[in-house]
Amino acid sequence: MATFLSRLGRLAFRRRGVMVLLWLLIFGGMGYAASTAPAPPADTFSMPGTESQEAFDLLTEKFPDASADGAGARVVVRAPEGSKVTEPAQRARVERLVARLGASSPQVAGVADPYAYPDVTISEDGTTAYMAVTYKVPAMEVDDKAHDALDAATEEARRAGLTVEAGGDAVRIEQAMGGTGEQIGILVSAIVLVLTFGSVIAAGMPLITALIGVGIGISGITALGSTLGLSGTTSTLAMMIGLAVGIDYALFIVSRFRAERAEGRTPEEAAGRAVGTAGSAVVFAGLTVVVALAGLAVVNIPMLTKMGLAAAGTVAVAVLVAITLVPALLGFAPVKVMARKGRLAYAVKPLSDRKQRRAAKHAAKLARKTKPNLGSRWASYVLRHPVAVLLVGVVGLGTIAVPAASLELGLPGEGQMSTETTQRKAYDLLSESFGPGFNGPLLVTVQTKDAKDAKDVGDEIGKALLKTDGVASVSPATANKAGDTAILNVIPETGPTEKKTEELVRELRDVAGGLEQSTASRILVTGQTAMFIDFSQTLDDALLPYLGLVVGLAFLLLMVVFRSVLVPLKAALGFLLSVTAALGAVVAVFQWGWLADVFGIDAPGPIMSTMPIFMIGVVFGLAMDYEVFLVSRMRESYVHGARPGEAVVDGFRYGGRVVAAAAVIMMSVFSGFIVEDNDFVKMIGFALAIAVLFDAFVVRMAIVPALFALLGRSAWWLPKWLDRILPRVDVEGEKLGRAEAAPHTHTDGGRERTLVG
């Protein structure tokens, strides 16, 4: 592996003009394909194998008109204090609003007059009413003119004295933030890179190559959108993780290149060595990330499967960019910019394999005698106090992880939006006037098996369901044209995200199961609230199998890379510890409400169902980057003759600063989301930032070297029978060193010293 990648790196360096041109052509070609591709399909959501999905499929078949995918808005009006919407003056204002909404846009299909169904659409106290606005097009296709017309109509009613708010997928979601957080993150990233490399050119290279890789990946997703059914949101995860690993991979190779230049190698030799060693680590780190993302298929939710595979493809592009485009761009950088201060006198002479190994060991000892940097000083401290560092790290993260045992999953809704948004205000008005369950009605479908009239059977079932504790009301049944299927709405007494509503859904399904035989019908409970509950349950059930798959395959890959049983075991356990601690912090802040005022959280509640899966995918990728890059340098030093403790110090001397820089960059980027108004965006930013903090600085920088200090040579133990059957990939570049057989001599005060990179 190392030999092949070294040749590839040298080839890219020599043919840098051709290589850069090739990538620019790919970038331009993918951009053109994306710009000319048909519009991607609208977002679709399905969960095969769940009762909610089965009911929705039945509705599509039996109620084709009602199951149309047009957008909708629910406009809520409240009369001035002391008045009612049923009074003539207020009624005239409301009817004027209804007329204005109906004529607001050609995309509007109709508006339901609240006075036509007062028992349903007007509150008992007469102060509040709502009207449903239906559109001819899906939410993604509602244009700006329609949005503006809706806003203008509601604003006019407000000026007339009414309190008017609107919710639903047809209502424009205001973006209160202007990108300040992301700008701060990018600025911090640039500063960290400049401090790491001491050069604007060297610092800009990881950013540029990462953007090129992400651009190609996202363009490919867009170009294939209509063919493979990839919606506009499929690229969300690909954008996030592609940018993260793209920066890391380029950062690792550029850093190794500069280290090789400091050892006295020519630019072409340094590029070959950098791609052969750090590039090998990049390839295997990328492979573990691809495994983690492709593993999302085990959740059995098509949307997540597509997102995972799209992100995996983008990561693969990032790996290819790192091992081909980065060495090509290094060839264009000024020599003084890309070279560290170091020993730069070279007189090349070949040595035998035995002499070369002795020379390598001598060079490593000489390097360890040089002035230690912060990374090597920290590693030396951990080696002196391994038990204390290990206990502090494990106990600290374990304590933070305790709240994760109380994790409750849910999906975002208008009830979790900022209290300043019109959607949240409409949600609160409906809850106050019609009850908290009004925002999350359940839909029950009744399909008769014999020639019975579905409406009569539905009404009979509705009376039975009304007796269930937690049900506020049940609507009369509505049958389809064929008369074989009916639907009825069940309004819970509790809100959509409350635990009691989830328990009610399960109880209604149990009751329905008992009624099916007596009524000779098929009864299914669905609706948005029920689907959210099923979705959360599906993700909850899939979380442990997904973790097992990802960690298991990563264990096998890392065992091949490091030829050790204990190294991949501690890497996997360390990842689980950091992720669990991050989940514990998220639960404490966003579910329990600790420090809610500090982070500006309006409504603590259940954790977004997709957040743990996304966090695992992103953080796993970054964690394996840090693990592979740090430990591969340790392994490289160890196989070249260093003692276990010396190998740990070498790994931190050459890799500590780079891993720390990569972690700070990712933390700054993710932290930018914390200042967003939306609580769920805050949650994702907080979760990813604190997970990177825990994994990079506690697990990789503290627990890992402490374990190496305690295990000694046992850390690299591998059973002989396993050593024989595992393929040898040579990430540490041992074969590469023998193949080159080209040490360098450094003249120092009349003495000749032999150095090997």
Image (cartoon, helix red, strand yellow):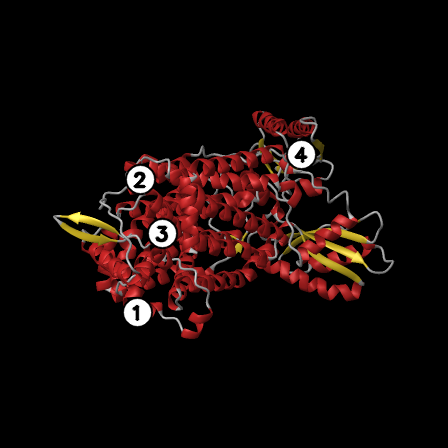
Secondary structure of residue under mark 3? helix
Disc 4 marks which amino acid? Thr
Q: State the residue in front, 400 or 463.
A: 400
Q: Quick one: label 4, few (<14), some, or many (20+) residues within 10 Å?
A: some
Observer-side mark, 2 or 4, equals 2
Q: Which is more foreground, mark 3 or mark 2?
A: 2
Q: Which label number is shown at residue 64?
A: none
- Number of marks: 4
Mark found first going from the N terminus, 3 or 2: 2
Q: Label 4 belongs to which residue?
A: 86
Task: From the top left corner, tell me how far across and down residue 352 is, in percent.
Answer: 29, 60
User: Which callout, 1 or 4, points to the residue nearer the camera?
Assistant: 1
CB-based contact (under 8 Å), mark 3 and mark 2: no
Name the image quarter holding residue 49: bottom right
* Residue 675 placement, left or right of 191: right
The earlier-in-sequence mark between 2 and 4 is 4
Vertical position of residue 564 compared to residue 584: above or below: below
**Distance between the Cα atoms at labels 3 and 2?**
29 Å
The percent coordinates of residue 666 (x first, y second) are 39, 46
Question: Which of the 4 quarters of the picture holds residue 207?
Answer: top left
Spatial CA distance of label 1 from label 3 is 29 Å
The location of residue 23, given as percent across then percent down, is 49, 38
Mark 4, mark 3: which one is toward the viewer?
Answer: 3
* SS at mark 4 in the image: loop
Which residue is disc 3 drawn over?
693
The answer to whether residue 437 of the structure is visible from this angle is yes
